[in-house]
Image (cartoon, rainbow, N blue to C red):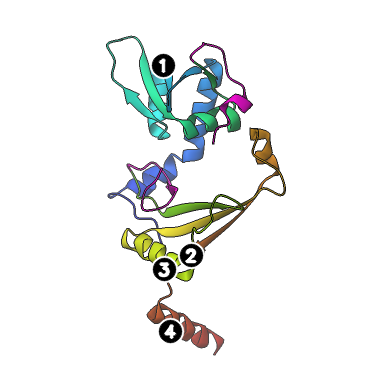
Amino acid sequence: MRPRWKGKGAEAKALADPMSEIVSQLQSSLLQSNACAFLSGCSVLLAVETEQTELLTRACFGKPIITAEKDKQWFQLGLEEAFYLCYSLKCLKIAGEDNFVKNDVDLWLPGLQYGVDFVAYRHHPSLVHSEYAVIVLSEEGDAGRLRVWSDFHCTIRLCGSVAKTLLMLNVDKNGHGAISPSCLERYSVEECTITRWSPEQSRDDQKASENGAK
């Protein structure tokens, strides 16, 4: 399934401004400012500068919060977003309600849309529709989830109705637990895409293969 770009020129704009470069700029900016966010319930609040506001928006991290403060902009990050910036990119510190910075273990705690865990975008959501509906499966905790063909059939039909490809991520913990984020380095992830079988497409592919063999 090809990307469905939103509007004329969206693809060219995305190629000229790759997401990897935007995230790299954001990482550098947060590191230089020694950024520290604050844990607040099920979200994380981050005070940012003008440049960082633009980078967070372009990278599609969190959402701005309107406040009475004119000299400071606040962003609300999701727990997964904040953990990624803190643990993977190492460009953000996170403090608890006691104002003490939390370590990786403290932050290691146990998005539902289209019946899946996540949706994945090629670039910023303002430019392109999400291409993949992502389901994450592990050795335990998924009893009864996508265990029979009828479950696969229903999920694939739902993904097809919203023009998305089902992407399954099977996480193998390789005998390690999940007591700290350091376990992530020992995990292995197998990914596979599952699409609905189309008789017409299968016949077209077979004809193309036969013609190519002649």
Q: Is residue 178 above or below residue 64?
A: below
User: What amino acid type is highlighted by mark number 4?
Assistant: Arg
Q: Residues within 10 Å of mark 3 (few under 14, many from 20)?
A: some
Q: Earlier in the sequence, mark 3 or mark 4?
A: 3
User: What amino acid type is highlighted by mark number 2?
Assistant: Ile
| Circle on res. 203 | 4
Residue highlighted by disc 1? 49
Residue highlighted by disc 2? 194
Q: Is residue 123 magenta?
A: yes
Q: Report helix, strand or loop for mark 3.
A: helix
Estimate the x, y position of residue 5 in percent, counting from the top left: 33, 52
Q: Which residues are magenta?
A: 97-126
Would residue 2 be seen by someone viewing this image from the given angle? yes
Q: Is residue 177 magenta?
A: no
Q: Nearer the viewer, residue 69 or 104?
A: 104
| Labels in figure, total | 4
Residue highlighted by disc 3? 153
User: What amino acid type is highlighted by mark number 3?
Assistant: His
Q: Is residue 206 above or below residue 88?
A: below
Q: Report helix, strand or loop for mark 4.
A: helix
